[in-house]
Amino acid sequence: MGRSLRDEVGLKTLSVDRIDHMLFTVSGNGPHVSLKEDLNATGANRDHYVVNIHIEDHQDFITAMFMEAEDLGND
């Protein structure tokens, strides 16, 4: 999917009316009030979504993700 998006944007074939917006956060706490404020302030010309994933052991999760990322391609 990432490659398809890159190719469409790079070739300028992706028209503005085909783009929606999504703000995706991962945190150790609940969504901050500013996320809701930001969503409420958006224009009505396209769809907007906000997703916050709460991970209780957020710091351990981040550490594990960086450790796994370091190992990518080492097989």
Image (cartoon, rainbow, N blue to C red):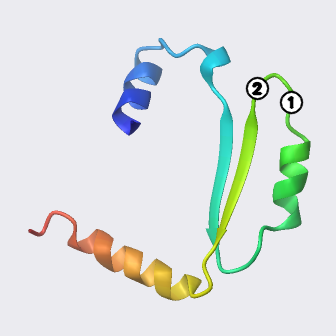
Q: Mark 2 packing: few (<14 Cα in 10 Å), some, or many (20+)? A: few
Q: Position of residue 71 (x, y in %)?
A: 21, 73
Quadrant position of residue 63? bottom left
As drawn, is 72 to the left or to the right of 19? left
Q: Amino acid at mark 2?
A: Arg
| Image height of 40 relative to 69, above or below | above
Residue 56, image x, y percentages: 62, 85
Q: Secondary structure at mark 2?
A: loop
Q: Please report the residue visible at 57 percent of the width from the left and 82 percent of the height from the top.
A: 58
Q: Amino acid at mark 1?
A: Gly
Mark 2 and 1 residues: CB-CB less than 8 Å, in contact?
yes
- Expressed as whole percent of the image width and height from the top left, the position of residue 46 reads 76, 26
Disc 1 crowd rating (10 Å Cα; few below 14, some 14-19, many 20+) is few
Looking at the image, residue 24 sits to the left or right of residue 6; the answer is right
Count of marks, rendered view: 2
The residue indicated by pointer 2 is 46
Residue drawn at (68%, 49%) of the image = 23
Looking at the picture, does residue 63 appear above or below residue 53? below
20 vs 56: above or below = above
Q: Can you give x and y, in whole percent of width and height, for residue 29 in the image?
A: 73, 79
Kindly indicate the quadrant of the structure image that contains residue 44.
Answer: top right
- Image quarter where the C terminus lies is bottom left
Q: Which residue is mark 1?
A: 43
Cα separation, mark 2 vs mark 1, equals 7 Å
